[in-house]
Image (cartoon, grey):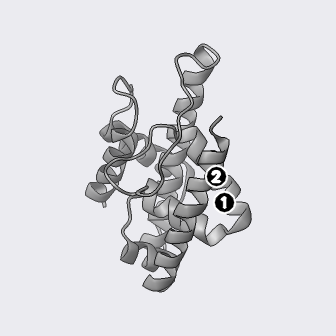
Amino acid sequence: MYAQLHAAARRLMDGERANHTLQPTALVGEAYARLAKELPAEWAGPREFYWAAAQAMRRILIDHARKRGAVKRGGDWARTALDVVDLASDEGCGNVLALDEAILRLEGEDSRAASVVRLRFYAGLGVDETAAALDLSRRTVLRDWEFARAWLHRALLEADP
């Protein structure tokens, strides 16, 4: 499980700015520390663990981005359009806050598709692992993934001035 979470963290960090202070190992370590502190020691199964890990890594990246943005009320941030065509690829994405806001809006429209995105993007799960974690068919996950990618792509383009 550690190797999978570390690979997901590395993908997430690949899309961040070059001088990012968080490293993949630190992200996984901090996520584990939060999980150990906040949640029960025993997991019902991999589904619950991966979901909690994805949520923990998401919260850490969001908190880190907010802290950095608060330093200079935007600092050297530049608004950029995000390409979510390959959210789970090695390319990652550079604007965690914009993506997270879009995922929250997606959740209001299709909570299952948002869950698929969170597991694939934040936890780094593949299609089959996501299907098992959410107790869905492979085809349903693929359909939700396609819908979510298109929806998020449109939402992020609309948000870009």
Q: Farthest residue in the right direction?
A: 108
Residue 133 in sight: yes
The image quarter containing residue 131 is: bottom left
Of the numbered discs in the image, which one, if any, rests on residue 106? 1
Query: Dot 1, how many residues are within 10 Å of its Cα: few (below 14), some (14-19), or many (20+)?
Result: many
Give, as a three-letter code, the residue at label 2: Ala
Residue at 39% of width from left, 27% of height from top?
Answer: 20
- The vertical placement of 111 against 97, above or below, is below
Residue at 53% of width from left, 34% of height from top?
Answer: 80
Q: Secondary structure at mark 2?
A: helix
Q: Farthest residue in the left direction?
A: 3
Percent coordinates x, y for residue 24 in the rendering: 33, 40
Query: Dot 2, how many residues are within 10 Å of its Cα: few (below 14), some (14-19), or many (20+)?
Result: some
Circles 2 and 1: CB atoms closer than 8 Å: yes
Percent coordinates x, y for residue 35 in the rendering: 49, 51
Q: Which residue is mark 2?
A: 155
Q: Nearer the viewer, mark 2 or mark 1?
A: 2
